[in-house]
Amino acid sequence: MAGMNDQEILEVVDRAINDFTGNLNDLGSAIGMLMLGRRYGWRVVLLIHSPSTVRKYVKILGLRNLRDALPEVGELAHRSNAWKLIDGTANFWKVVRGQISGVRSAIVERSNNR
């Protein structure tokens, strides 16, 4: 599945805002994860955030999981330093589980074609 379309994403965000109780910083971070993920993909999201943080944000957003909501690899994934390190290797899940350290990174670089 390619993930949700923009209208479906907006509906998730609106529903989360309407239903949320708690610290608004958590809600804002969850929405930010979702919005970035729609362009970077769920694999990059899992390289940025810890599994427990992703679970927390997915719960806040009322989603079953990220795989249904986001593309696996978004059109901007190539800008992610962490994705560049593991793209094409079999190490993705080892990095996500913490079995390989030093790869997780939230750093992105400007695309050369812009």
Image: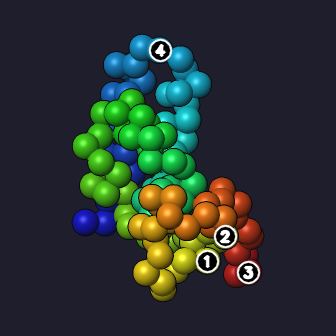
Amino acid type, residue under disc 4 in the picture? Gly
Q: In this figure, which residue is indicated by the disc labeled 2?
A: 81
* Proximity of marks 3 and 1: CB atoms separated by less than 8 Å: no
Q: Secondary structure at mark 4?
A: loop
Amino acid type, residue under disc 2 in the picture? Asn
Q: In this figure, which residue is indicated by the disc labeled 3?
A: 112
Amino acid type, residue under disc 1 in the picture? Leu
Q: In this figure, which residue is indicated by the disc labeled 4?
A: 22
Q: Nearer the viewer, residue 17 or 27?
A: 27
Earlier residue among tags 4 and 3: 4
Q: In this figure, which residue is indicated by the disc labeled 1?
A: 85
Question: Mark 2, residues whose alpha carbon is within 10 Å: few (<14), some, or many (≥20)?
Answer: some
The answer to whether any part of residue 6 appears in the image is yes
Earlier residue among tags 4 and 1: 4
Determine the residue positioned at 44% across, 41% down. Answer: 52
Earlier residue among tags 3 and 2: 2
Q: Position of residue 8 (x, y in %)?
A: 31, 46
Mark 4 or 1, which is nearer the eye?
1
Question: Mark 3, residues whose alpha carbon is within 10 Å: few (<14), some, or many (≥20)?
Answer: few
Query: Hey, which quadrant is residue 101 in on the image?
Result: bottom right
Residue 1's label in the rendered image is none
Amino acid type, residue under disc 3 in the picture? Asn
* Proximity of marks 2 and 1: CB atoms separated by less than 8 Å: yes
Mark 3 or 1, which is nearer the eye?
1
Mark 4 or 3, which is nearer the eye?
4
